[in-house]
Amino acid sequence: MNILVTDGISAEGAALMRDAGHNVVEQKLTPEELLEKIKDFDAIIVRSATKVPKEVIDAGNLKVIARGGVGLDNIDTAYANEKGIPVLNTPGASSISVAELTIAHMFAVSRFLNLSNTEMREGKWPKKEYSKGIELTGKVLGLMGAGNIGREVAKRAIGLGMSVVAYDPYVKETDLDITLTTKDEVLAKADFISMHMPFVKTEGAAIGEAEFDKMKNGVVLVNCARGGVVNEAALLKALESGKVRSAGIDVYETEPPTEDQKALINHPRVSVTPHIGAATVEAQGRVGTEIAQKVIDALKS
């Protein structure tokens, strides 16, 4: 069968599908080109860049829609389900990579790594300015979401001597040393808050002005989940008031960010990365082989 891969896949994943007898076409397409060419394919594999809305589903004869990654917000899953088309993803394949980036942002803003790297290359010696870093050990990490990625973050945080509280309406128990509690209690208790929940457009941001008001003064916020789960205007206001000590951001309301987002991205107490949570060699290998095998299995049935 013909499989379209629009946003790239690991060589191992592509080889797996070809060895199973499928024709794999790896091609980046514009939305207009996708609408025109989708009729020639039995399955499509995307990442975050390509969108698969109702119009694309109607224009094709797809048997499988797959997303190499966690979120499915770029796919009209409800409509695909109505049409009887399975929608596949790889919720655990990139968990370690995203968790490690989350911890990296926590260290970066706690010890001014982002600023020190820039200023020392400019010939400065900001030893005195950055003498008030904070340790992660002994602090409370609040997880907003305790799924695959949240649990990987918790493992590393516990190893660093942090205590972990978490809010997740879908998780009722865990074998980790995590206290599952309410959203308000996480907001009130945490020294560090890390986002690990999906963005639901109909619900809007999970963290806005009301939630910032409930947080400790000097809290650190990290978002390596999805753009939109944190209201960026409210975060900038909280940074400027000092309510939020610092923030680490990998995902944005608009990607790539626009001119309107520059004040947040350039804020001196913000560490930024360009949506690279899953962008490690190891994660991409796992994502590619896992989604390939899932597509192979789905096409068999």
Image: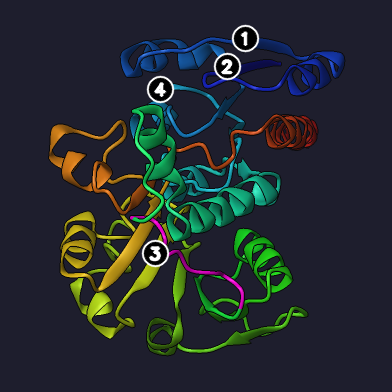
> In terms of secondary structure, where does tag 1 sit?
strand
Earlier-in-chain disc, 3 versus 1? 1
Q: Which quarter of the rendered picture does the C terminus lie within?
A: top right
Residue drawn at (37%, 73%) of the image:
219
Q: Amino acid at mark 1?
A: Val
Please name the residue that numbered disc 2 is placed on.
41
CA–CA distance in space, label 4 to label 2: 11 Å
Left or right: where does residue 34 sit relative to residue 267? right
The amino acid type, in three-letter code, at marker 3 is: Leu
Task: State the CA–CA distance, disc 2 to disc 1.
Answer: 9 Å
Decide: marks 3, 4 in contact (CB < 8 A)?
A: no
Pointer 4 residue: 59
Q: Secondary structure at mark 2?
A: loop
Above or below, comparing residue 210 to residue 34 in the picture: below
Q: Which residue is mark 3?
A: 221
- x and y percent of residue 180 in the render? 58, 86
* Nearer the camera: disc 2 or disc 3: 3
Which stretch did the figure color magenta? Answer: 129-137
* Residue type beneath disc 2: Phe
| Marks 2,1: beta carbons within 8 A | yes
Q: Earlier in the sequence, mark 4 or mark 2?
A: 2
